[in-house]
Image (cartoon, rainbow, N blue to C red):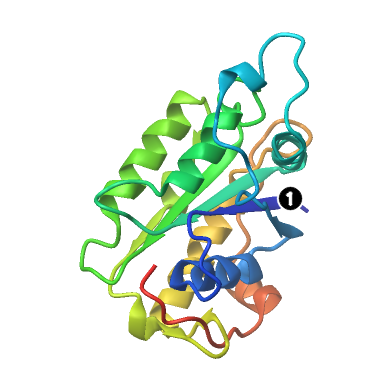
Amino acid sequence: MPRLLALSGSLRARSSNGAVLRSALELFDGPTGTADIGALPHFNPDLDGEGATPPGPVAALRTAVGAADALLLVSPEYAHGVPGVLKNALDWLVSSGECVDKPVAVITASPFPAGGDHANAQLRETLRMMTGTVVADACREIPAIGPKVDPAAERVTDPPTLADLRTAMTHLAAAVPRPDGAPTDPAPASASASASGAIAGTTGATV
C-alpha cells in the first residue's frame, strides 16, 4: 500500500487545519505519518552547500519525504499567503530532489468563504516548480471550517466535508504509480469508505 506523509502549515496545538489533516490521514488507504517541520532552522543555503552536512531536522525531513510514496500538505492561509513554517520546509526540499515526480495533494481550510484559495494556489505553484506531481483531483479549499470540526475530538465531523476528503484521498492514492510504473487503480467508493471507517470530531480553531 502507498505510504503518505503529511506536512502541516499550522503549529497550533488545537488547529482546525490540524483537524483536517488528521481526518484526511485516517481516510487514506495506507500507512501514514506527519513530518515535524517546527524544528527546522530558517532556510540558509550556507548550511547546505556542497560538502556540507545538513542540520539534523533537515536531514530527517528529507529522509521522511524520500521514503513516502505521496505527500499531503494541509495549511491555513495568512495574509493571503502561505505560513512561513511550511514555506520554510519546502525551501529545504527544493534542491535535494525528494519531491521530484512525487504525487502531492494540497488542502487549505479557512473560516472565510474562499477556503484559503490564495495559499492553495501558491503552494501548488511552488510544488510544480519543485517538479512534484500536483494531483488536482486531490486538492481542496475548505471554506467556513469552524463549525465543521469538533474541538474535543480534533477531527472533522461535517459529513459532506468528510465525504469530500475521502474522495480526495482516494484520488491521491490512485496517483501513486504501481511498481510497473502505472498509476494505482482507484478503489471503489464503497471499498474506500469501508476501509476508512467512521471518523468523529476536531478542533474549532480558526487556522
- In the rendered image, the quadrant that contains the C terminus is bottom left
The residue shown at (30%, 57%) is 116
Most extreme residue toward the top, as rendered?
A: 50
In the rendered image, the vertical position of residue 169 relative to residue 198, given as above or below: above
Quadrant location of residue 22? bottom right
Residue 145 quadrant: bottom left
On the image, the x and y values in percent for residue 124 come to 40, 39
Image vertical order of residue 167 relative to residue 6, above or below: below
Residue 107 visible, this orientation: yes
At horizontal 36% and vertical 73% (from top left) the residue drawn is 206
Q: Is residue 67 left or right of residue 36?
A: right
Looking at the picture, does residue 103 appear above or below residue 146? Answer: above
Label 1: which residue?
A: 2
Residue 88 horizontal/vertical position (percent): 51, 38
**Residue 140 appears at what percent x and percent y?**
39, 58
Examine the rendering and report whether any part of residue 135 can be seen: no
> In this orientation, which residue lies closer to the viewer: 101 or 148?
148
Name the amino acid type tagged 1.
Pro
Residue 60 in the image: x percent, y percent?
76, 40
Mark 1 lies on a secondary structure that is loop
Image height of 173 relative to 57, above or below: below
Crowd band around label 1 with a 10 angstrom C-alpha radius: few (<14), some (14–19), many (20+): some
Residue 83 as seen in the image, left or right of residue 183: left
Residue at x 46%, y 67% (from the top left corner)? 17
User: What residue occupies the far left of the structure in this picture?
Assistant: 113
